[in-house]
Image (cartoon, grey):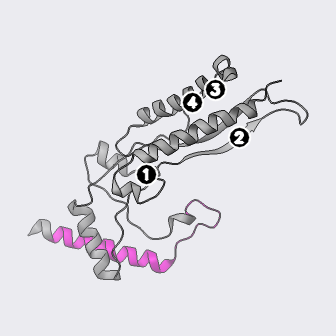
């Protein structure tokens, strides 16, 4: 038989090429500073019903990043083009194409310019109170920031305690001292913004 698992490698190679091209095309310093701002991840692969059979079907679930300024629909179209390219490159897949189904959360991008008063003033307060100026970076994960910016026409940045490397992990934690420090920074920033508006 023809192994669906073997043909999955064809699709994965096409997705790797697409990931490389998408990331190489990014020029915004907020995103390029991340090294790989738009990773394509296959986190679950399932198939087969018996150990001694050739897999006739494989289902792979993963994540496809939405580029800065891109809509979820446009990202889905990019993903489909990458899978279509894999299908076109392989004799078997031309006749039995891999398909894409979009499920789960779909998050558009959102952005506030680095020189906007919100990140500039918040970073200044953080530096004054902590002695450290927070880095102004983009992030590749989904967040509600996009709703404030795109739907509510409200500037928004993400600022908070903790280390994103342990977020959503088995050992997710945030030191209390960082929570307290963040609260002081935000309270001071709010007080200063209110004073500016009044005066």
Between marks 3 and 1, how big is the CA–CA gap? 30 Å
Q: Earlier in the sequence, mark 4 or mark 1?
A: 4
Is residue 101 visible in the rendered structure shown here? Answer: no
Q: Earlier in the sequence, mark 1 or mark 2?
A: 2
Instruction: Please name the residue that numbered disc 2 is placed on.
Output: 45
Residue stretch in magenta:
167-195
Q: Where is mark 4, residue-wise?
A: 83
Q: Mark 1 near mark 2, Cβ–Cβ under 8 Å?
A: no
Q: Nearer the viewer, residue 76 or 160?
A: 76
* Residue position for label 3: 98
Within-10-Å neighbours for mark 4: few <14, some 14–19, many 20+ = many
Q: Residue at x 34, y 57 (%)?
A: 29
User: For the N terminus, which image quadrant?
Assistant: top right
Q: Which mark is residue 143?
A: 1
Report if the CB atoms under discs 4 and 2 are less than 8 Å apart. Answer: no
Q: Which secondary structure lies at badge 2?
A: strand
**Which picture quadrant has residue 32?**
bottom left
Which numbered tag is attached to residue 61? Answer: none
| Percent position of residue 196, x then y | 13, 69
């Amino acid at each position: 038989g023809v192994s669906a698992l073997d043909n999955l490698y064809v699709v994965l190679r096409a997705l790797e090429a697409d990931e490389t091209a998408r990331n190489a095309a990014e020029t915004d310093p907020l995103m390029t500073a991340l090294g790989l701002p738009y990773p394509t991840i296959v986190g679950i692969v399932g198939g087969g019903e018996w150990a001694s059979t050739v897999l006739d079907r494989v289902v792979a679930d993963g994540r496809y990043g939405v580029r800065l300024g891109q809509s979820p629909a446009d990202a889905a179209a990019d993903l489909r083009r990458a899978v279509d390219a894999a299908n076109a490159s392989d004799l078997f897949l031309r006749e039995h194409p891999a398909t894409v189904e979009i499920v789960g959360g779909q998050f558009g991008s959102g952005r506030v310019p680095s020189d906007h008063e919100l990140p500039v003033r918040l970073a200044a307060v953080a530096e004054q109170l902590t002695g450290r100026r927070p880095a102004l970076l983009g992030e590749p994960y989904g967040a509600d920031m996009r709703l404030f910016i795109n739907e509510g026409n409200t500037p928004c940045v993400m600022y908070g305690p903790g280390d994103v490397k342990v977020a959503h992990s088995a050992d997710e934690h945030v030191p209390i001292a960082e929570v307290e420090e963040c609260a002081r920074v935000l309270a001071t920033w709010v007080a200063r913004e209110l004073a500016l508006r009044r005066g």
